[in-house]
Amino acid sequence: MINRWLFTQIDNSALIIFRVFFGFLIAAEAIGAIFTGWVRKTLIEPEFTFNFIGFDFLQPLPGNGMYFYFALMGIFGLLIMIGYRYRFSMTAYTILWAGVYFMQKSSYNNHYYLLLLLLLMMIILPAGNYFSVDVKQNPSLKKIAMPRWVVLFIILQLWIVYTYAAIAKLYPDWLDFTVAKNLMAGRAYYPVVGPILQHHWAHVSVAYFGILFDLLVIPLLLWKRTRFTIFCLGIFFHLFNSVVFQIGIFPYLSLAFSVFFFSKEKIHRIFMKKKEFYAGNEIIVPSYKKFLIPVVIIWFAIQITLPIRHWFIPGDVLWTEEGHRLSWRMMLRGRSGITSFYTIDKNDPKKERKIVNKKAYLTSKQIRSVNTKPDFMWQFAQRLKEKYAAEGKEIEVYAKSSVSVNGNKRKVLIDPEVDLANVPWNYFTTNPWVLKYSD
């Protein structure tokens, strides 16, 4: 039974055309990051970046090095698209993207995490075995079929992403349209659509259509009777997100995944007429079976458990942020506030507190995160500690915070009596100096 489900050979047109789309989109992501100013604002202008904790060794290349870094990624993306040294190019892009992903959090986006997962997946998928430079140079690589597990793997991964995104929206501030209203208020200046998005009916539509689409899109794409209808709705949904929220390649990548849901015959007929269609149903059990099944089980065990880890951490994740990342909690909250930092020289007998001028160290974008997110506050304190240590001083760092989530009443986020420069960061549980509230 398991061999029939996983290793029955099917036509590979969907995977091949997806590789072409994918390569083009990730090339556009890299090159676009340069020309939109993202690289400059996020990686070149800051004195340092807020990396994922534990990845302190990852900092941007000096000078204009990150421009060349992203240009190289763009080249590898194009090589993936045309299928030149596919696995090498795929692996190279993955390593470079992982470096950028773990290097900075100021522009954190769940879609960047999804892209990292997709890159890892695409390394192992046989996506370069047709319509590629590799096959032209070495015809023995040519294949017109692939094992069924390839499609099942992709669909299950997408199902997890969309389902958790829907579940995460089932909380009061989303259901009473507060989040939608706040999101649209920031887009009131958009020509034509901006004023329309300020109406209550628009907030209701965004809130409930968002939940229903995320929850139902995969099941309805799998059902033949609803496939075309939900695909058309998906075009509207993703283009709306692209225009209104400007979230890069993700909407177009989501549409590209549709090739795995339509019939193999239709995808072959639309995109690859000249390719021989594979109509057989051979079951070919590969030698890598003994490795594949454990790896897939571990992969999906991680994918299923990571998004629920915040339930095992004290406090509300919307407030504490502990367990927020890697959990498909997309566009769920807006944070605002102000946090002041004070230093005390340990050798000062008066223990005088001196306020820190954040603008001397941080960009405006970084300041917004440092003002409202606990891990940024802790890392900034560590950075101050290092700076002063280089001058031969030992300091303590304290934070006085006032933070609001979704426009609600401001509250103190960080215990103002805790020296952030000299407390450890707890990776897998709560940090006691992040204050919790019963409401």
Image (spheres, rainbow, N blue to C red):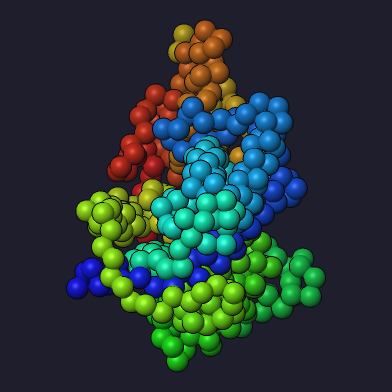
Tell me the residue at 61%/66% (across/down): 252
Residue 248 placement (x, y as % from top left): 63, 58
Residue 337: give x, y in percent of width and height.
Answer: 57, 48
- 77 displayed left or right of 279: right
Residue 3 position by quadrant: bottom left
Which quarter of the rendering shows the C terminus? bottom left
* Residue placed furthest toward the right: 191
Residue at 37% across, 77% down: 280
Asked which quadrant contains residue 148, the reply is bottom left
Say if residue 171 shows up in the picture. Answer: no
In this rendering, does residue 356 appear at all? yes
> Residue 285's spot in the image, x, y percent?
26, 63
Q: Is residue 297 left or right of residue 107?
A: left
Q: Is residue 381 above or below residue 245?
A: above
Q: Position of residue 303 (x, y in %)?
A: 34, 57
Q: Residue at x 70, y 37 (%)?
A: 67
Q: Give the camera-side residue of 283 and 413.
A: 283
Rendered image quadrant of residue 419: top left
